[in-house]
């Protein structure tokens, strides 16, 4: 699959990128649906073996491999869909970046090693020596870090202070029937409550020698910037899901019935729908979650779960033998479960005893991300010569603002 992340593109280049994306996603969707058909055939063969009380390890292995392939292809489709959406909104080109040249250069130095200090130099291989001028691979293959797409599904609010205060209307206005000439005494008025959403700070302060920055045959500053950006995204995504609020966002799972922040929101906790099994769910339990959500929230509702849970869900059928999970059928369309979109989030718990493994609802109305500013970078070549320090910070908060818009499954 082609890489679709140009820093800036012209109008003609943007059209070319869109064309490349369309071609890629068409091929991906074709491969995805082909593999999903093979998955269904293999699962049916496995069910026949189970009915005959016969266990063929070859079929089991094939089923798991195809299931994994379907998951990988759907994830690739989701990524291209997100990139195409960003292109439509100008997120990958045009004037979206900072216009100040000095700030732009500093911004490229944000790095991804949260809460650690790392030093790079030319002398030690593991600390930069690999990058000094010899004949070497001019690309770097990074260790996978899975990042949850909470920013794609939740609401976002930028603030200028340290805390955002969300105001709630708890209703309570009273009324009454009266006769034509009867007295009209004062009635009760609505109650108002508020909930503060404070920002926490993520920081990183990696360092590199000036010689390494001068001599490395890749753009070392941009590479380190990417490292920090990925680490920051990883840290904040996990906090949006399960953060305890201590110098970090309050994760939405902590607002569920019986969880740490169940009483924090004035509107109450997120309802937890029980699953009878400790590591599985049924079609009926998924329907229970759907119908537990008020109808006003269902139009933009979606499922949220991790890859392991998706692998289990993909095997479920309804009473007529139809698979509940369906892959993307065209560009821009996500996979669906019971007709609702599915977002894969690596930070969600696995299906296990007492786990909150699956969430469902309108996340734009249910969860708010609060950004104080963007990523700030201070390039410091003076404090620790010969190292250049890149002190990088980001301030972000998050909280459930409408627990009625979200539901979770809790295993027995």
Image: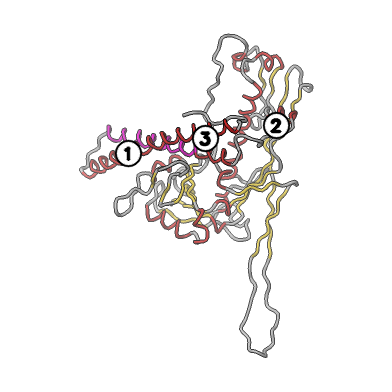
Residue ID at (72%, 24%): 389
The residue to which callout 1 is attached is 39
Q: Secondary structure at mark 1?
A: helix
Point out which mark residue 393 bears. none
> Can residue 112 be seen at all in this image of the molecule?
no
Q: Which residue appears farthest toward the bottom when viewing the image? A: 181
Which of pointers 2 and 1 indicates the residue nearer the eye?
1
Looking at this view, is 368 or 34 the one in front? 34
> 151 above or below 76?
below
Q: Which residue appears farthest toward the left when viewing the image? A: 52
- Residue range in magenta is 57-80
Bin the neighbour count of mark 1 within 10 Å (Cα to Cα): few under 14, some 14-19, many 20 and up: many
Q: Name the N-terminal-most of marks 3 and 1.
A: 3
Q: Is residue 322 left or right of residue 180?
A: left
Looking at this view, is 136 or 146 the one in front? 136
Q: CA distance from mark 2 to mark 3?
A: 33 Å
Residue 58 sits inside the magenta stretch:
yes
Q: Name the N-terminal-most of marks 2 and 1.
A: 1
Q: How many marks?
A: 3
Q: Is residue 338 left or right of residue 304?
A: left
The residue to which callout 3 is attached is 18
Q: CA distance from mark 3 to mark 1?
A: 31 Å
Mark 1 and mark 2 in contact (Cβ < 8 Å)? no
Residue ID at (44%, 45%): 352
Q: Which residue appears farthest toward the right when viewing the image? A: 382
Residue 309 is situated, as x and y percent measured from the top left of the image, at: 43, 43
Point out which mark residue 392 bears. 2
């Amino acid at each position: 699959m082609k890489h679709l992340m140009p820093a800036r593109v012209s109008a003609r280049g943007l059209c070319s990128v869109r064309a490349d994306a369309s071609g890629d996603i068409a091929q991906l969707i074709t491969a995805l649906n082909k593999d999903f058909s093979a998955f269904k055939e293999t699962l049916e063969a496995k069910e026949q073996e189970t009915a005959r009380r016969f266990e063929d390890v070859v079929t089991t292995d094939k089923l798991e491999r195809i299931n994994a392939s379907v998951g990988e292809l759907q994830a690739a489709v989701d990524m291209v869909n997100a990139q195409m959406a960003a292109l439509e909104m100008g997120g990958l080109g045009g004037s979206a970046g900072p216009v100040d040249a000095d700030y732009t250069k500093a911004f490229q130095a944000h790095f991804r090693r949260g809460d650690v200090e790392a030093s790079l130099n030319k002398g030690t291989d593991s600390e930069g020596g690999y990058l000094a001028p010899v004949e070497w691979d001019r690309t770097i293959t990074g260790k996978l870090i899975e990042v949850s797409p909470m920013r794609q599904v939740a609401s976002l609010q930028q603030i200028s202070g340290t805390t955002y205060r969300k105001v709630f209307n708890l209703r309570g206005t009273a009324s009454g029937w009266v006769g034509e000439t009867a007295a009209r005494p004062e009635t009760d008025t609505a109650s108002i409550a508020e909930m503060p959403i404070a920002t926490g700070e993520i920081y990183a302060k990696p360092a590199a020698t000036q010689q390494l920055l001068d001599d490395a045959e890749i753009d070392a500053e941009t590479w380190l910037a990417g490292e920090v950006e990925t680490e920051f995204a990883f840290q904040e995504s996990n906090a949006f899901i399960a953060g305890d609020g201590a110098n970090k966002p309050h994760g939405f799972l902590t607002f569920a019935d019986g969880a740490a922040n169940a009483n924090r929101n004035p509107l109450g906790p997120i309802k937890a729908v029980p699953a009878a099994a400790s590591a599985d769910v049924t079609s009926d339990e998924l329907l229970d979650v759907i119908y537990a959500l008020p109808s006003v929230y269902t139009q933009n509702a979606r499922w949220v779960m991790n890859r392991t849970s998706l692998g289990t869900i993909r095997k479920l059928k309804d009473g007529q033998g139809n698979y509940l999970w369906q892959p993307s059928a065209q560009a821009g369309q996500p996979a669906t479960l019971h007709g609702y979109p599915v977002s894969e989030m690596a930070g969600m718990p696995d299906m296990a005893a007492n786990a909150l493994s699956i969430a469902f609802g309108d996340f734009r109305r249910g969860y708010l991300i609060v950004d104080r500013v963007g990523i700030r970078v201070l390039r410091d070549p003076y404090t620790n010569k010969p190292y250049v320090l890149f002190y990088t910070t980001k301030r972000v908060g998050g909280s459930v603002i409408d627990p009625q818009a979200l539901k979770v499954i809790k295993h027995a």
